[in-house]
Amino acid sequence: MGVVYKARDLKLDRFVALKFLPLYFGADENEKKRFINEAKAASSFQHNNICAIHEIDETEDEQMFICMDYYEGETLKKKIGGGPLPIEAVIDIAIQIAQGLARAHEEGIIHRDIKPANIIITNRNEVKILDFGLAMLAGEARLTQKDTTKGTVAYMSPEQARGEEVDCRTDIWSLNVVLYEMITGHLPFRGDYEQAIIYSILNETPEPIIILHTKVPLELERIVNKALAKNPDERYQNMEEMLIDLQSCRKVPLAYQKIKKSNKEMFKKLMGIFAIVLFLIFLSVEYLLTRQESKTFQIKHTKPLTTAPGLETDPAWSPDGTRIAYASNEGGNMDVWVRQISTGQKINLTKDCTDYDGKPAWSPDGEWIAFVSGRNGGGIFVIPTLGGIPKRVVSISFAAYLSNISAIPHLSWSPDGMELTYAVVGHIYTVPAHGGTPTPVSLPSSGLAVGYSEPAWSPDGDRIAYTNFVALGVATSQIWSAQRDGIDPVPVTEGKYFDHNPVWSSDGEELFFISDRGGSRDVWWVSVDGRGKPSGPAQSLTTGLSVGAIALSRDGTKLAYTKIMEHSNIWSIPIVPNRTFTIDEAQALTKENNYIDLLSVSPDGKWIAFDSNRSGNQDIWIMRKDGSELRQLTTHPAHDWVGSWSPDGRQIAFHSMRCGNRDLFVMPVAGGAVKQLTNHTAEEIVPIWSPDGKKIAFVSNRKGHMDVWVVPSDGGEPQQLTFDGAQGKCWSPDGRQIIFGSKYQQYSELFLVPAEGGEPIQLTHGRWCGIDPCFWSSDGSMIYAWGGGRPGKEGTNFWEVSVSDGTARSLLDLRHSLKEPQLLTSDGERIFFTLWECTGDLWMAELSMNK
């Protein structure tokens, strides 16, 4: 909220604290006046536990500052850093904070940012609440985004974390988070990332205080539990109620000490028995609430399996659990390796081929390993586990996937070893393991751009679990279970998160999977019945690992997983006639270990906007083309992805998860209020401004699959332009047409559609493996696109397509690169793009199971 200086008041000869506020607090004159008026209200009352505001003014360069009381002492944050506080001190501090808050609430002022860093304990043991009303004033003055949550995440109330309107009960919640922390020494709601903490606040129950601190008065624990009710109506309704209960706790610790002195040993026994009884009651209640969950899994021990540079992923256990197969680019390209667990010895089974070899799957009898390969036109092969000549099972062109290694489909053996199942182009097939004709699994049409993938047989062979991906570029997916012939599909997960890679437990009573529902990609599991239907809530097995793939040993005692690190950087190549570049000739603009997804060049060609997780969250940033003057535009706890600049360069359109699913927003580049354009339960992504600035095109699955829609840039009802699926889009320079990519049978082609609506016209007939248009040349004669190329040119990723006849020439060839390209943009002279890189090692976790 600003920078604080210790200063001397020369007129009154006293020390004061000067807080200089961020420059955007005075950016608008009307908002500045409103801010000052609201600040007057906050300073109009005095209380011994509230830091007084003496003055609000601004410097000659218009930087606003607040003059406040200065106190000798330390923050509560520093005091808690030494561990749990004595109960007497906890109660005294809580009472003083509550007294200050109660007085402010009488004036209708809500703090909204109660946390230990905002509490000073003076040398006289007086409590002083700092920054009172500052967070509220900033919000009321709309100097931050309307739906932005204020305050430090770990201390936010559920309603505050959701961005809803708050009242005094949000301060009651935050005070009791502080109270819990003073008693136990740690926070009740924790996580490695802001989203993980928010998930915990909204969904999890804190560990009971009595377990962490057996000597805490029961009345004090009752106060904390009541005040941390997720429903505001179940909390204290005002601070006075809570203050009365806190004051009743004052004598409890003293009574405890008196009893302890008179009969120390007896009291210890009684307290111990009482704590055990309470703990058993807690376990009983917990069991009743989760009685459908028959098991609990825990990790006993972890150790790394591989340490080679590059990427090791897609583990597969041998049936006896002594070896593991995996894919690795240790040898310069992706190959299938086998490692002995006990000795660490390893062999490369597919070093005979420089094409992609990966996604290994071990046969139930332990004799064969099936894998996906680009060799000899592509297909599924099997190879003896000790090495030998690969045998083709089925010929399949994986060209559409080989430009995106992370999307290559998984393989799974049937339990009897007679069949293999796999997914390609969004459909699941089975094929005899010795070779033959594939048979499609007759699942209902998903109607989505990606469809089904990652099939996994149940141990009894009756069902197949699989992932249903919503669409390309949309990180939400859903796990399902169906009979082996596709009958009786049952949803396993809700479809609100990125849930994928289902793996059955050895007895078929649980499904393990990877999910980002806790903030990072981790291993989760859920109990299921005979149909695969969940019989309890999903539970996390790991936290904060960033897991890429998982495999469970046949006996269920060992879990192998990939611990990955993803990052991408911005690169560029010049647009040169009759010239194809390689990655060695591209110029890197950024060099960091963060993830950059989408980017856009400003209309004047001087700035690049992009989204990055460099702050721990996917936010929007801008910088000059040379990488200088880096500036962060969004700081919302939800993820934001950049779309495009407005034609005048003053605004940026983007899509965000701020409302729980992806919607479209517009914000000023200079900072200010964010405007929401769409609010729909569908996923709506990558908004692109029309040349005249009046409309914004985007892609949405409102009708079941991704199509192009257009919405007025100032808000209104969207219009659907395509009806058969679309992979990308961009406006013609005159704004009369929109080019988009769409699948033609199993191939991708480019189509033109009138911007006002009408019948699309097919532009290309190249039977592309995957192509997405990104921008037009300024004269409208060429379209620049990226994609998987055409048969024989799968690695050629950037293309220049003639609008007159649909012919194409390559701009960048990545056939020998392990880096994956993303969407591109241009300033007219150079093409800017991101290259995705992924490194990772295999780890093994030993599991324990308790019934």
Image (cartoon, grey):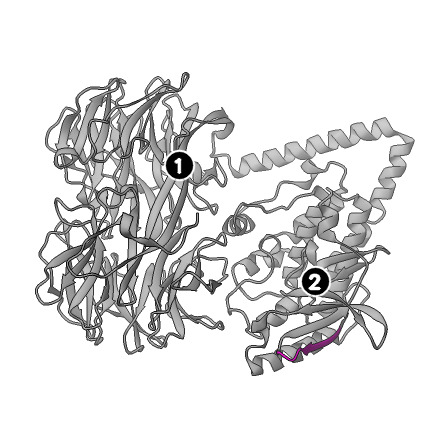
Give the percent coordinates (x, y) of residue 650. 40, 75
Residue occupied by mark 1? 840
Query: Compared with residue 652, is residue 282 higher up or lower down, i.e. above or below?
Result: above
Q: Residues within 10 Å of mark 2 (few under 14, many from 20)?
A: some
Residue occupied by mark 2? 238
Secondary structure predominantly adopted by residues drawn in magenta: strand
Amino acid type at image mark 2? Asn
Secondary structure beneath label 1:
strand
Residue found at the very far right of the displayed protein: 262
Q: Which mark is residue 545?
A: none
Give the percent coordinates (x, y) of residue 584. 28, 48
Q: Nearer the viewer, residue 261 or 51?
A: 51
Amino acid type at image mark 1? Gly
**275 with respect to 550 (left or right):** right
**Spatial distance from mark 2 to mark 1, Cα to Cα?**
51 Å
Callouts 2 and 1 close, C-beta under 8 Å: no
Q: Nearer the viewer, residue 407 or 297?
A: 407
The residue that appears at 30% across and 75% down in the rendered structure is: 695
Q: Quadrant of the N terminus?
A: bottom right
Query: Compared with residue 613, is residue 276 higher up or lower down, i.e. above or below?
Result: above
Q: Can you tell which of label 2 and label 1 is closer to the viewer? A: 1
Give the percent coordinates (x, y) of residue 362. 28, 24
Give the percent coordinates (x, y) of residue 95. 78, 56
Residue segment shown in magenta: 54-61
